[in-house]
Image (cartoon, rainbow, N blue to C red):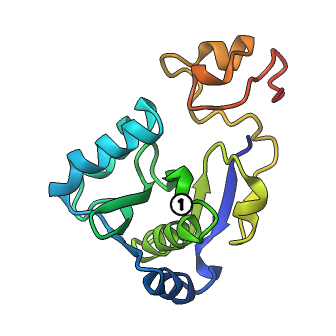
Amino acid sequence: MPDMLVKLYDLPALEPAISNQRVAGVNIRRCMTPEKFLVLGWIREHFSEYWVSEADVGFSVHPTTVMLAHRGDQMLGFACYDTTFKNFFGPTGVDAAERGQGIGTALLLTTLHAMRDAGYMYAIIGGAGPVGYYEKVGAAVIPDSEPSRAYSGMLGTEAVYAHGAPSDSFLGMESINQNGDAV
């Protein structure tokens, strides 16, 4: 999974994605700090402890750098930026039962527009899984960035970067062999 670069000065318009979600009864917005434990609990239930740790950082600044998709009181997805590294988009995730309805795209665009509004010209998507998906918003693979080294050296990642490990050992990544190739 390579790193990708997004030109924030040349993003697709935000409004069509947000309007489509609004019509479907889905609200996309920035999280409020009092929602921290609800949101982190949901991420823990649907994704991983690593992602909980990253999203937690997004609640330590004001305004938060965590975006939320919800229908009434039902959380549907989230997206973050500036949580592991400055200028990094992610992590992001949508409830498996709600995928394919444009929620992820609305969260992605909302977050990228927020990054542009915060003064960034470019965003980095570290360890981008669905490359084709991100290319739809103008993201380009950063040469020689596969596998992503963003998390290299982090506790629990040595097996992924040095020895190839089962996908459940780190962020749900596919196994990476000793040459750094995804298998």
User: Which residue in the structure is indicated by mark 1?
Assistant: 98
Q: Quadrant of residue 174?
A: top right
Say above or below: 72 vs 80. Answer: below
Q: Looking at the image, which residue is at 74% across and 44% down?
A: 2
Is 83 or 175 nearer to us in this picture? 175
Residue 121 in the image: x percent, y percent?
Answer: 55, 71
The quadrant of the rendering that contains the C terminus is: top right
Residue found at the far left of this picture: 34
- In the rendering, at what x and y percent does residue 39 appear? 30, 50
Q: Residues within 10 Å of mark 1 (few under 14, many from 20)?
A: few
Q: Nearer the viewer, residue 89 or 104?
A: 104
Residue 54 visible (yes or no): no
User: From this viewpoint, is residue 132 visible?
Assistant: yes
Give the residue type that dot 1 points to. Glu
* Image quadrant occupied by the N terminus: top right
Q: Is residue 79 left or right of residue 65?
A: right
In this view, the residue in front, 127 or 48, is 48
Based on the displayed image, in which of its 4 quarters is residue 139 positioned?
A: bottom right
Count of marks, rendered view: 1
- Picture coordinates of residue 25 (x, y %)? 41, 79
Q: Secondary structure at mark 1?
A: helix
Relative to 62, does residue 118 appear above or below in the rendering? below
Q: Nearer the viewer, residue 139 or 129?
A: 129
**Residue furthest front as drawn:** 97
Residue at 64 percent of width and 12 percent of height: 159
Q: Position of residue 106 (x, y in %)?
A: 53, 73
Placement of 137 over or under 87, stated as above or below = below
**Residue 78 versus residue 121 in the image, above or below:** above
Residue at 53%, 68% in the rendered image: 103
Write the residue at 69% across / 54% down.
4
